[in-house]
Image: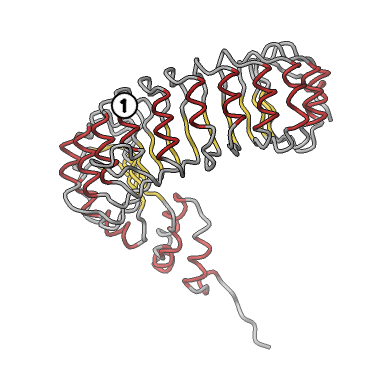
Amino acid sequence: VWKMETHISCLFPEILAMIFSYLDVRDKGRVAQVCTAWRDASYHKSVWRGVEAKLHLRRANPSLFPSLQARGIRRVQILSLRRSLSYVIQGMPNIESLNLSGCYNLTDNGLGHAFVQEIPSLRVLNLSLCKQITDSSLGRIAQYLKNLEVLELGGCSNITNTGLLLIAWGLHRLKSLNLRSCRHVSDVGIGHLAGMTRSAAEGCLSLEYLTLQDCQKLTDLSLKHISKGLTKLKVLNLSFCGGISDAGMIHLSHMTSLWSLNLRSCDNISDTGIMHLAMGTLRLSGLDVSFCDKIGDQSLAYIAQGLYQLKSLSLCSCHISDDGINRMVRQMHELRTLNIGQCVRITDKGLELIADHLTQLTGIDLYGCTKITKRGLERITQLPCLKVLNLGLWQMTESEKVR
């Protein structure tokens, strides 16, 4: 009788590569150091599919980019930039994603030397918190990165409407744009993005995700531009935009592609604004109006009437009570996440209503709801699908937990 000994060294390289693909990045690197057979298998492109290389660019390393190329790695995050950015671009001609987030020393000059010809493979560029970057860099990006789909500019506070005009002129395939805290951007710039200045720029009419958080100069006119031109928009973040008001909600109320709207800390949004949203043709899945001081129980009645298909609703610190909860719960059959932290008027009665009617809830935030007691919480913990319960300031002892 033949007896066959099977050892891991007998495995075909393709099988080894399949096993290695399940390891985390650090372990992928470690298996490559075991022996030549494992090293060869670990260099198979399937092992590294989708991996982002995180690099400190300091001294010259001639083997770095050939090694990344051999493994098929096309996504890179630069953790610190002590060398020229052109070193990366020349070393990785097929780069798909470049993350420079927090590289404070990156300048227009450095970026200008790197982007000197078209880079058709680059789809994702993250420049968030690269605070020295100005409109001049956006000109380079618009000229040479025509296939860009994602551009992160959060915290790039030197960017102006001129930069947005350049983006609107060159980046027609852009799907996601983050302009968080770009404080110089105004309605004119949003008009450029939305194709309102066609003679100069076509606009980014394929945008699906737009973050305008903390862009203080924006008014309701921006929302008018967005509703007219950016008809494919799915996610709009307007949190901390103090210049927008209830009237602006009329423009947004007929954006049928929109499924997530963030109005967190928009101080001028009241029950009237929610009424406008609810009376339109929206099919919103997520709405955040946390810290909007002027929103109360009447908004919940409007939401139940016209936004009843919501899956996620955030009302933290809003002036709502058990009465508002009572007016809402019977219509909200789709609701999965409800955030009512710091809603200090909610009592056990409100929690009982939630437990009786919102049976699909998977998560609820009750942080700082000081009027609730063990009785209400017992009802909430019996929700059949509940996975996340945030109590924060309210602590249950082990003996009180419902088993």
| Front-most of residues 115 and 329 | 329
At 45% from the left and 51% from the top, the residue drawn is 25
For the residue pair 395 and 226, the one nearer the viewer reads as 226
Q: On the picture, is 21 further left or further right than 80?
A: right
Q: Residues within 10 Å of mark 1 (few under 14, many from 20)?
A: many
What residue lies at 51% left-to-right and 25% top-to-bottom?
A: 263
The image shows residue 119, relative to residue 241, as above or below, that is below
Instruction: Identify the amino acid type marked 1.
Output: Val
Residue 129 % position (x, y): 32, 30
**Which image quarter is the C terminus in?**
top right
- Residue located 78% across and 23% down the image: 398
Figure colour scheme: secondary structure
Q: Quadrant of the N terminus?
A: bottom right
- Residue 134 x, y percent position in the rendering: 22, 31
Q: Residue at x 50, y 59 (%)?
A: 21
Would you say 91 lies left or right of 36 here?
Answer: left
Relative image position of residue 354 (x, y in whole percent): 77, 26
235 sits to left or right of 76: right
Disc 1: which residue: 185
Question: Which quadrant of the structure image shows residue 313?
Answer: top right
312 is higher (above) or lower (below) than 265: below
For residue 220, which quarter of the picture? top left
Q: Residue 261: where, in percent of width, then height?
A: 53, 32
Q: Residue furthest bottom?
A: 1
Is 293 situated above or below 112?
above
Using the image as rendered, state which of residue 151 and residue 381 is in the foreground. 151
**How many tags in the picture?**
1
Q: Secondary structure at mark 1?
A: loop
- Rendered image quadrant of residue 393: top right
Left or right, 43 with reference to 19? left
